Image: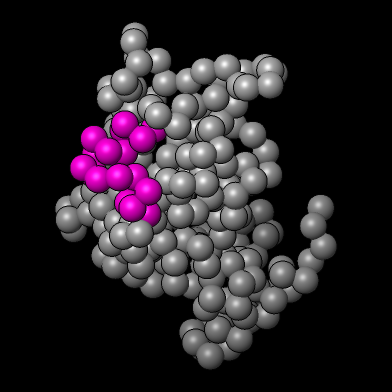
């Protein structure tokens, strides 16, 4: 997978690329490139935003500066870029990120993430340059960079070989393997600590019973009311 992130703060992704599973992804030929769209703005002094028409607080990322950045990267009209790769704007009102969407994106060869700032994007960016809008939750961040890292983290860990053991990304919370339910409890040594004992079934060595117990625990967690 080749992932491009358009951002005003490309240096933030230097840390992201140091994570072990991201390094594993790079070793397998995948990549995450952070593109500073301030570098290609046609405006003076690196300007990329402007005041909203109609008044109001904050600044809005301009459609012309976003077009310039996408043209410089892909050497074509940004309207057509979304026809061959997923171009995703990180917005509070977008499709909520879940395991199904992460799996869907992990099947793509190329994705582009657009990070908003200030009051967000000029609506024409969303209408004409973007194939998807994605949200990591119904709240507002100062910008899309953290959201982009969350999306990339969930997607990259699903790529074969990235986690070392591919099973780690199959049977986990909200996955299809668990019918969308939370993952079951995990325990490790010591088997007894301060009188808090590990369930006997996990020490039994009976794999079928262990699997049955885990599925039952997963279903029970799914049925538990939220706090």
**At x 35% / y 40%, what residue is drawn?**
5
**At x 47% / y 27%, what residue is drawn?**
62
Q: Nearer the viewer, residue 57 or 128?
A: 128
Rendering quarter of residue 140: top right
Q: How many marks do you count on the picture? A: 0
User: Whole-percent x and y of residue 213?
Assistant: 63, 81
User: In the drawing, does residue 78 fall left or right of residue 169?
Assistant: left
User: Whole-percent x and y of residue 218?
Assistant: 65, 73
Q: Nearer the viewer, residue 136 or 120?
A: 120
Indicate yes or no whether the magenta region holds residue 108.
Answer: no
Can the viewer see residue 14 in this picture? yes
**At x 56% / y 38%, what residue is drawn?**
123
Q: Residue furthest top?
A: 45
User: In the drawing, does residue 152 fall left or right of residue 210?
Assistant: left
Residue range in magenta is 66-82
Q: Nearer the viewer, residue 30 or 111?
A: 111
**At x 67% / y 60%, what residue is drawn?**
196
The image's colour scheme reads one colour
User: Whole-percent x and y of residue 99?
Assistant: 53, 64
Quarter of the picture containing the N terminus is bottom left
Can the viewer see residue 18 in this picture? no
Indicate yes or no whether the magenta region holds residue 69.
Answer: yes
């Amino acid at each position: 997978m080749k992932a491009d992130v358009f951002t005003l703060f490309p240096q933030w992704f230097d840390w992201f690329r140091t994570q072990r599973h991201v390094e594993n992804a790079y070793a397998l030929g995948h990549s995450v490139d952070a593109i500073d769209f301030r570098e290609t703005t046609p405006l003076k002094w690196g300007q990329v935003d402007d005041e909203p028409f109609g008044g109001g607080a904050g600044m809005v990322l301009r459609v012309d500066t976003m077009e310039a950045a996408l043209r410089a990267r892909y050497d074509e009209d940004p309207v057509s870029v979304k026809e061959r790769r997923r171009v995703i704007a990180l917005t509070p009102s977008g499709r909520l990120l879940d395991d199904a969407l992460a799996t869907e994106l992990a099947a793509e060869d190329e994705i582009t993430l657009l990070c908003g700032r200030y009051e967000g994007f000029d609506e024409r960016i969303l209408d004409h340059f973007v194939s998807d809008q994605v949200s990591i939750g119904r709240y507002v961040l100062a910008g899309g960079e953290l959201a982009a890292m969350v999306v990339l983290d969930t997607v990259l860990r699903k790529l074969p070989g990235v986690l070392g053991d591919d099973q780690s990304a199959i049977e986990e919370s909200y996955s299809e393997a668990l019918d969308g339910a939370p993952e079951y409890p995990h325990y490790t040594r010591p088997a007894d600590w301060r009188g808090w004992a590990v369930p006997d079934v996990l020490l039994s060595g009976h794999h079928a019973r262990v699997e049955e117990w885990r599925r039952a625990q997963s279903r029970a967690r799914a049925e538990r009311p939220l706090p």
